[in-house]
Amino acid sequence: MEMDPPRLGMGAYSGPVRPVGDGDGGAAGETMLLWALGQPAAQRHNAFVRHGAHSLTLDACGRRLSLLQSPSSMSTPGVTGAVVWDSGVVLAKFLEHAVDSGLLTLRAARALELGAGCGLAGCVAALLGAHVLLTDLPDRLKLLRKNIDLNVGDDARGSARVAQLVWADDPHPDLLNPPLDYVLGSDVIYSEEAVDDLLLTLKHLSAPHTTIILAAELRNDAVLECFLEAAMADFQVGCIEQQQWHPDFRSTRVALFILLKKPPSQPDVLL
């Protein structure tokens, strides 16, 4: 399958981005491309994380981060945010690498991490200078607060705080005022049943200039195709290739997407 050529820059990210859906393949073509070329099942599962451990350590932003995990919570149906996934590590290290490379600016930006879980990407964004709202369901916020306290101190360039956000619910006005510069998410594309709620939330959170960066675990091609097909109705979608990621944190089991909300269509003018 022929890949769409990359273009330079999308939203706030100024590096190369390969458009998704511009060619004839659409969502199905992109999904087939990721599975055919990347062979995600052939790479080791959980290469950067240990789900059985009660904490994950990671060097980022000139310090050693320690993220508390709750492995016992994984036995509860539907709970995935109690541990860090490879996609969270990939996203966090991509943000650091992109900022260090001058391809992304987070200083003084307003960001929101969606389905933050243990909060790795949000904590790294705060250390890189962003003012971050780390959001999740009510029963996940205690762990988030602990990890913020452990990893984002008074010496951080930015700031981090926790807020409740249930997908598909109208977000509290405080989350949108001032408008968000970034929405970040890892492992948020996990079931077809959640796709509509996720996309509705992304639309609620997105201003015209908001850049959405999502790291997806490649577990199920049908789920990813469902998400991309639905997303392309309201968003421009691009894929950030692995050559742009942190060189030590690349995995064919993860895909990195960037989304921008499409401008409203203009009504036809009758002459």
Image: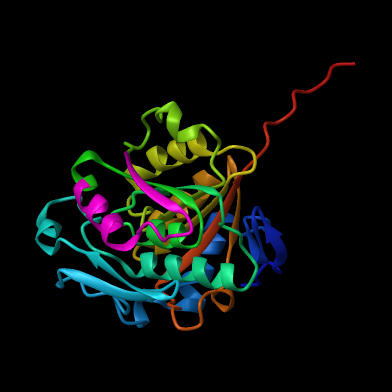
Q: Nearer the viewer, residue 127 or 166?
A: 127
Is residue 118 visible to us here? no
Task: Please report the residue visible at 21 percent of the width from the left and 57 percent of the height from the top.
Answer: 82
Image coordinates of residue 264 in percent, x first then y, are 67, 31
Residue 176 image offset from top left, x and y in percent: 49, 33
Residue 271, image x and y in percent? 90, 16
Residue 89 lies, in percent from the top left, at 38, 69
Q: Is residue 27 above or below residue 50?
A: above
Tell me the quarter of the picture where residue 243 sits: bottom right
Is residue 235 or residue 126 the one in the foreground? 126
Vertical side of 45 occupied by 110: above or below: above
Residue 263 in which image quadrant: top right
Q: Residue at x 38, y 33 (%)?
A: 168
Coloring scheme used: rainbow
Q: Which residues are magenta?
A: 142-163
Queried whether the magenta region covers residue 147, the answer comes back as yes
| Residue lying at 12% horizontally and 56% vertically, measured from the top left | 73
**240 inside magenta stretch:** no
